Amino acid sequence: MIDFINRPFKGAELLPVERFKLFHWVLEKKPYNILEIGTGKGGATYYMAEAIKEIGKGHIITCDPHRKPDLKLFKEFPFIEYYKMKSDVVIQDVIDRGIEIDFIFFDGPEDPKVALRNIKQLEKWITTGTLFSMHDWETEERIHDNGISTKAKLIRPYIEKSKRWRKIEVLDGLESSDTVGLCFYQYKR
């Protein structure tokens, strides 16, 4: 049984409800290639990997130029490909290698330009049906910690106004203390 309260890989990532949702979104949609921007200590990576393990097939490509998860994560889930590199370099590598990404998870730096630049770079490559999720979706003071994240400041209005992205679900951090905001969208070319 997966424990959504006590996580085996520590970090400031994902609250229990967010871990539960991310795990179940991956489990339900059964993506084959997940691209994660912002590995951190591997908290979100772990829950996506647990879903992939339950599905029985899949691959996670993840990157973070500043932090690295515990090596135990890679031993437990050999289908995780980790890069200690900037996201735009990894995205270009994925494109150059011809890897079709069907699930994207963003939890990168507190620089709103990075997320917007990354999604625009990916939109040139991804196909209809690609799924997208982002942590810290709220751009105003949230209930959970009275904090404000800037990472979604540019990408959120871009996606919400786009005719190419369809909202599936959003956990609202302005109405609930259980989340700092987590979105789930699907792309249509």
Image (cartoon, helix red, strand yellow):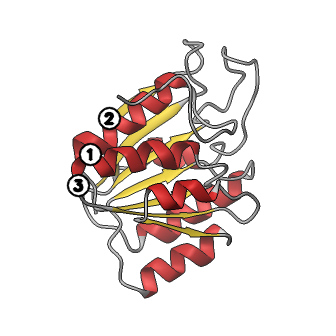
Location of mark 3 (residue)? 56
Q: Disc 1 on helix, strand or loop? A: helix
As drawn, the label of residue 182 is none
Q: Position of residue 167 (x, y in %)?
A: 35, 37
Amino acid type for the residue under numbered disc 3: Gly
Q: Residues within 10 Å of mark 3 (few under 14, many from 20)?
A: few
Q: Which residue sits furthest bottom?
A: 96
Place residue 115 in its image quadrant.
bottom right
As drawn, the label of residue 54 is 1
Q: Position of residue 141 (x, y in %)?
A: 72, 22
Up-down relation of residue 24 to residue 173 (above or below): below
Q: Position of residue 92 (x, y in %)?
A: 53, 80
Please name the residue shown 60% across and 13% down the image: 177
Q: Is residue 183 visible?
A: yes
Q: Residues within 10 Å of mark 2 (few under 14, many from 20)?
A: some
Amino acid type for the residue under numbered disc 2: His
Location of mark 2 (residue)? 24
Determine whether label 2 and label 3 are within 8 Å by CB: no
Place residue 13 in its image quadrant.
top right
Q: CA distance from mark 2 to mark 1?
A: 11 Å
Q: Disc 3 on helix, strand or loop? A: loop
